[in-house]
Amino acid sequence: MKIDDPLDFEGDNDPLLTVRRPAKRKKVIGLDDLVEDYFNSGKDELKASAAKSKGRPKGDNSDDEDRQVRKKEIDFCKFVEECEEKKSPSVLNSTGVENCQLLQSFCGDEQLGFDLEIERGEGFFEGMLINGWLLKLVLLYGSVEDSIASWVLTKYTSDGGPPQNITAWLRVVSACCKIRKMHAVFSPSEAEDVLVIVISLFLDRRLEGLLLILGDCLNSLISYFNTSEWESSCLIVAESISKRVKMDLNCLRLVDCITGTNDRSKFLRSQLALQLLKNSFGLKVANVERILKSVTSINVKEKECNFFMLYVHIVLMDNLLFSSDAFRNKTAIIDAWRIFLRNCSTHIGCTDWRFYASKVRNKASYLLQGAMLKRPAGSGNIPAK
């Protein structure tokens, strides 16, 4: 072995050095690939037919191939058109705006100088909307047809998400709620549906820049109901929202979005927490005592303890008990809740690295301090347990 020769481990083909094979990349199949495969399959059929017709004259064979290729092109174009119609149906037809009175008046009035057809109504309305004439007509007549409002809302969406003009719609809803004494724009059931929708919008991360406008609209909707309507409507809204959201951090986000300090906002926050807890424990009736017993029966020392769900439960339970004044004077319930919070804050060690264990300990300690400040007059210390 010469001095200048490479050592054994410097060889190019060292068996100890593993060479990674390049990872296979998934091929994204586009429309061009589908077209190519479609016509390639047609070429295979042409080759097969050409093999059968070897005895025919060359001129006839060429004409047959051209006719078959042309037929393939026509069939493929029809196939693409059918797919496009099924994938993106006309927004105009789906909303029924083609039968609205406004479009019919333009189509039937010869003095306007328009030669407008129903099929071109969507483009006509889109131009009016962009140029501001549609808004001027709505302001002039003081009303808008349901089909036109639905078309505007459906036409301008961020891929099935909220419409781009969501800010204007939220302000319109707020304005409609504030004139309830002069004119009731929404029926109680309609206001309930709108309230559920507005609360659900707080989960859309794309609307985080509109939290102030969403909050104003939410408070306006809460104030829209009469005193005789609010209690039953609040229960309906809370039940509807609790069925829409899962028991995770999103349900806590919905409870926290109700930030009003008036009695109605506090009652809605308490009722929403109650309905979420009822669904979580599979109860048919929202009974506070049974829910409290289910929460306080959780043993934090068990290895199988689900600290994440416990975290959700204690936050919801605290909102249920202290958002409104309904349970502040029920000493037995409040004392049992304080004992459980103290046990969570003391029985979970600082070295417990289970998922969400530290968060439960810290949250329970924080809520315990607040529960001590909110205790009713005449209540003693927390009994030892």
Image (cartoon, grey):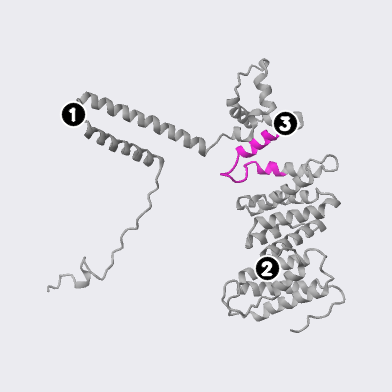
**Magenta highlight range:** 144-170
Residue 305 in magenta stretch: no
Return the x and y of residue 11 as percentages of the image width and height: 20, 68
What SS does tag 3 mark?
A: helix
* Residue at (22, 72) in percent of width and height: 9
Distance between the alpha carbons at the discs numbered 3 and 1: 74 Å
What SS does tag 2 mark?
A: helix
Q: Which residue is mark 3?
A: 138
Return the x and y of residue 235 as percentages of the image width and height: 77, 56
**What amino acid does circle 2 point to?**
His
Q: Which residue is mark 2?
A: 313
Residue projecting furthest to the left: 1
Residue projecting furthest to the right: 378
For mark 2, does the 10 Å Cα neighbourhood hold few (<14), some (14 to 19), or many (20 or more) residues?
Answer: many
Q: Which residue is mark 1?
A: 55
Residue 372 versus residue 242 in the image, above or below: below
Residue projecting furthest to the top: 111
